[in-house]
Image (tube, rainbow, N blue to C red):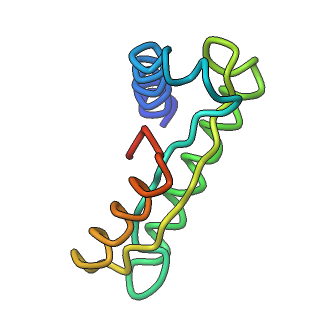
Amino acid sequence: MLHWIGRIGSTLLALVVALTGFAEAQGTIKVMYTDPLSGPFAQVGDQNLQQFKYIIDYINGRGGALGKKFELVSFDNKSQPSEALLALKSATDQNIPIIM
């Protein structure tokens, strides 16, 4: 599990480096996370969400990335493609630059 967490942490760090110009204009960097958080697969989605929260807290607890903190914004896609698209639209409307 730590290997998996390390990969996600590395991915987030790489995205932050790529978005340095954007990050300078804001105090936090929003990260969208979408998964089924209700319905028959809610348990899986909730477990994954908890892992992402742990990773975000871990990185933020060590000063963030390039001095910026991450903010996790979660969306329930209800295991439906149409809901996933609505979540993506909502994330883009909120100018969330990182989508997981």
Where does the image place residue 56, in percent across and percent down from the top left? Answer: 63, 37
Q: Is residue 21 above or below residue 100?
A: above
Among the 4 quarters of the image, the one containing residue 27: top right
Relative horizontal placement of residue 36, taking residue 23 as reference (left or right) = left
Left or right: where does residue 71 sit relative to residue 51?
right
Which residue is rendered at x = 39% and y = 78% of the image?
41
Q: How many marks?
A: 0
Residue 1, image x, y percentages:
48, 37
Task: Report the residue that reaches farthest toward the bottom.
Answer: 39
The answer to which quarter of the image holds residue 28 is top right
Which residue occupies the extreme left position in the image? 81
Q: Nearer the viewer, residue 90 or 69?
A: 90
Camera-side residue of 96 and 43: 96
The residue that appears at 64% across and 43% down in the rendered structure is 71
Q: Residue at x 44, y 21 (%)?
A: 19
| Residue sitting nearer the eye, 40 or 31 | 31
Query: Which quarter of the figure has residue 64?
Result: top right
